[in-house]
Image: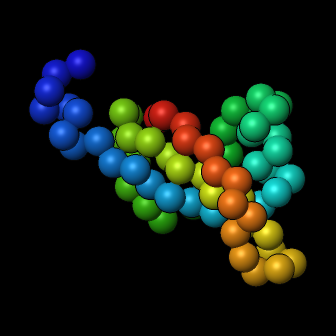
């Protein structure tokens, strides 16, 4: 990887509901289709933060996935 490519990499934070978080964490779910409401490129990191919709708050569990 070129040094310039490393400079342009981004970390994109996204909420993910518990059932989907568990599926990704276990390896059952490899990807999720979403509306393209954000820009993401190869080499970026997707930071998935588990969100509890019933309590309307983050659970504290997170994981990173490289694009």
Q: Is residue 28 above or below residue 21?
A: above
Q: How far from the left and from the top, in percent, is residue 32?
A: 67, 45
Which residue is nearer to you in this view: 10 or 41?
10
Q: If the image is split into quadrants, where does the N terminus sit?
A: top left
From the viewer's perspective, is 54 left or right of 44?
right
Q: Quadrant of residue 38?
A: bottom left
- Above or below, 51 relative to 49: below
Residue 60: tell me if it is visible. yes
Rendering quarter of residue 31 = top right
Q: What residue is rendered at 76% in x and 49% in y?
A: 21
Q: Residue at x 63, y 57 (%)?
A: 49
Residue farthest left in this picture: 4
Q: Which one is nearer the viewer's eye here, 30 or 45? A: 45
30 to the left or right of 6: right
Q: How is the image coloured?
A: rainbow
Question: Position of 44 compared to 67: left or right?
Answer: left
Instruction: Please tell me whether residue 2 is drawn above or below residue 63 in the rendered image.
Output: above
Kindly tell me whether residue 16 is visible in this rendering. Answer: no
Name the residue at 64% across, 51% down. 62
Q: Disc count in the image?
A: 0
Q: Position of residue 56 (x, y in %)?
A: 76, 80
Q: Nearer the viewer, residue 54 or 29?
A: 54
């Amino acid at each position: 990887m070129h040094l310039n490519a490393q400079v342009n990499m981004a970390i994109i934070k996204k909420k993910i509901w518990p059932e989907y978080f568990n599926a990704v964490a276990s390896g059952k779910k490899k990807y999720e289709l979403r509306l393209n409401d954000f820009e993401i490129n190869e080499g970026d990191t997707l930071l998935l933060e588990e969100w509890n919709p019933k309590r309307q708050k983050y659970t504290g569990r997170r994981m990173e996935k490289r694009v």
